[in-house]
Amino acid sequence: MAIWLDQRSEDFEARFSAFLSTKREVSDDVNAVVRGIIDDVRLRGDAALFDYSARFDGVDLATAGLRVSDADIDAAVAATDPEVLEALKLAAERIEKHHARQMPKDDIYEDALGVGLGSRWTAVEAVGLYVPGGTASYPSSVLMNALPAKVAGVPRVVMVVPASGGAINPTVLAAARIAGVTEIYRVGGAQAIAALAYGTETIAPVAKIVGPGNAYVAAAKRQVFGQVGIDMIAGPSEVLIIADGDNDPDWIAADLLAQAEHDEGAQSILITDDRAFGEAVEQAVERQLTRLSRSRTAARSWADFGAIILVGDFSAAVPLADRIAAEHLELAVAEPDALINRIRNAGAIFVGRHTPEVIGDYVGGSNHVLPTARSARFSSGLSVLDYVKRTSILRLGPDQLAALAPAAITLANSEGLDAHARSVSIRLNRGG
Amino acid sequence: MAIWLDQRSEDFEARFSAFLSTKREVSDDVNAVVRGIIDDVRLRGDAALFDYSARFDGVDLATAGLRVSDADIDAAVAATDPEVLEALKLAAERIEKHHARQMPKDDIYEDALGVGLGSRWTAVEAVGLYVPGGTASYPSSVLMNALPAKVAGVPRVVMVVPASGGAINPTVLAAARIAGVTEIYRVGGAQAIAALAYGTETIAPVAKIVGPGNAYVAAAKRQVFGQVGIDMIAGPSEVLIIADGDNDPDWIAADLLAQAEHDEGAQSILITDDRAFGEAVEQAVERQLTRLSRSRTAARSWADFGAIILVGDFSAAVPLADRIAAEHLELAVAEPDALINRIRNAGAIFVGRHTPEVIGDYVGGSNHVLPTARSARFSSGLSVLDYVKRTSILRLGPDQLAALAPAAITLANSEGLDAHARSVSIRLNRGG
């Protein structure tokens, strides 16, 4: 049973605030262990990777090989259901097309004074993509993380994935090939992050590491940040559905459960203006729960973090949605356009009754790596922008320098920075 | 004396690698102290701010007031040298004009299937700007941090600045007014960061915190990250100058010293193909050093971290520059255009002999908040993009859902996510 909150009740603000600040993750303090692993990989390189892989993944890399060969990938592609391959290709094509539109353009120009200014974008030179092992090893995530790097023009896209018990999900390898990953290594955990950040004999270091992982991987990413760039540290997934009473309760229940089945810490929230509809959805959730293979996870998530919020009208939902700042926001209402532009904070918005969030997980074309835990208030989903960086360009000749020098010298002096002032003044009234 | 490295010598790679990995910052572990301050501000709000400000800044906020009033700002503007005011206004105008070009455009479109896709950009709703007290309190940094927020359309731009001994640099307040800062509070340190992140009775919380600060401020920003967004944690400044023998050694020496005077941990590097020129620059540095008010800081920086690197030709400088990935890169060579597009990693490039980096610190128009410590390999300088976030939009009707459903269902099933598959399949062959 999810909790119910009624926006018109007196204690709503207190209960909603408490609901918003509920922690959905227990993060073990694994920092010391991770620090030791990183130091060891820096010291011993490949040998350390071999040891940890034997211990944690039960794989003998001396036999299996650290690098996944082209032949291994060929075999994985051959072992993948052709229907799945086709679906991955359709997804990849749509993701690539959409992300190509995100590529920022250089902007090099001269202003009225003749000063040359510019923003130049270049791809990060090498990116590492972490892919978890076991059941959290999602081919769709390989596409979502690797394709924007390909679109950005990153020359080296390196994937690491643990071979738990010696095996890697073949569909993950097939997805990597489709997504243009250039190197794949059989290694996971903090040791894989260390290898990507600092390099070993076999794995050359990268400049940025992306992709989801467990507590060890997340801690390792935080620790190597600075040495390399990292993407956001994603928390459990969440959906907010704003729905009127004209929806089929079963559709909305299915959408709530699609989030809930991800993780016990996932969160599914319904905002509706219709109590009877909310009750019908709740009943539909209970019915559908029994038929899911991951019903235990979904039931736990729904019971612990699910919520149904009643509002007087959908205008009242806008500030609530902005405070929830959901990773995924579905607008299953008659006139979604009236709401879209009033809501500021959401990772992605799914518009209308025929856009279940799941389409965005796979084949919509937009990215499914989105800001969780209210971070849509200040951050964005993964995009091509995460794989490029901007260099400012400034170009003055003697005339432009003469025009701007007095103000620069005045400001440098006012800040007490003599050498700054001198670096400009020394160039005045001189040849060049 | 800076170190000399000769790219053609046998031990160059070893020495250059060691040089690159030299740490230029001693970071005290202040995490426990900062954790206590943050918890206290969350618990006691304004009262905690009053206590810490009395203890650390020697200011009685009960008398001075936490919020800086409009009258205070009027007085600060009146107390600012009119020439400095004019220079700030010129700088602001140029910064605003340049940054306006960075504003990303929404991209809402329909693809060939009729699927509606979109990237919508919205401003962060409230931003906090930290400004250090004392000598590190730079009006130019107020402009550089606040103006992109104004251009992005951030409704609330909140500045915090410690009133060390009761006083705030009036030029900083004048710069805040010019830059469109909407609220200013007399508070600094970890307590100010806590107030911005969690709010107090007087200070409403923000969604993102930017701006430089000491070790306590940096630690506090790391600790509140997640609750709010933060900008990069900037390290000591650095410049790389690639210069041929046709430069005036005094000009180049002045530019090296303009970085060095910032901080003992700052770094100034010259790459040249002309040993005699390098020696002349070195002598010019020694000469100019004696005349600087911050000569002690500059001398320390140059002695500990300065370097002159000799190369056979400037092609050989390209990979070195990419590994150094300097915050500031000056190209003081006869044909800078031959180099610009070959160098991938740099925060900002200053082109030609008449573009000293200092122009970019103040009045060039580009931002002076740039990636330090080799992070230009994976990150960019501050821009309008740091104050906006992107929401993905996806919109399907029944036909589009029918077209994409089979692939989505196939992928959901292949990932073992029943409820995902069901959320799509339940909408097929039904009304809506």
Image: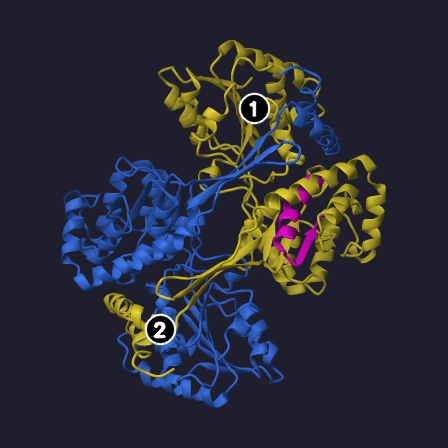
Chain colours: A blue, B yellow
Across and down, in percent, residue B242 comes to 51, 22
Whether the magenta-drawn stretch holds residue A53 is answered as no
Q: In the image shown, does A117 or A282 lie closer to the viewer?
A: A117
Residue A279's place in the image compared with A32, above or below, is below
Query: Visible in this render: residue A216?
Result: no
Q: For this view, does A242 lie left or right of residue B158?
A: left
Q: Amino acid at mark 2?
A: Ala
Q: Which residue is mark 2?
A: A258
Q: Amino acid at mark 1?
A: Gly
Query: Visible in this render: residue B219?
Result: yes
Q: Residue furthest front?
A: B112
Across and down, in percent, residue A203 comes to 28, 39
Residue B352: numbered disc: 1
Q: In the image shown, does A293 or A339 lie closer to the viewer?
A: A339
- Which residue is at a point 33% across and 63% down the rendered structure image? A363
Residue B395's place in the image compared with A13, above or below, is above
Chain ID of residue with mark 2 = A
- Tell me the SS state at disc 1: loop
Across and down, in percent, residue B365 comes to 63, 38
- Which residue is at a point 47% across and 35% down the rendered structure image? B374
Q: For this view, does B92 lie left or right of residue B409?
A: right
Residue A284 placement: quadrant: bottom left
Q: In the image shown, does A288 or B15 lie closer to the viewer?
A: A288
Q: For this view, does A288 lie left or right of residue B280?
A: left
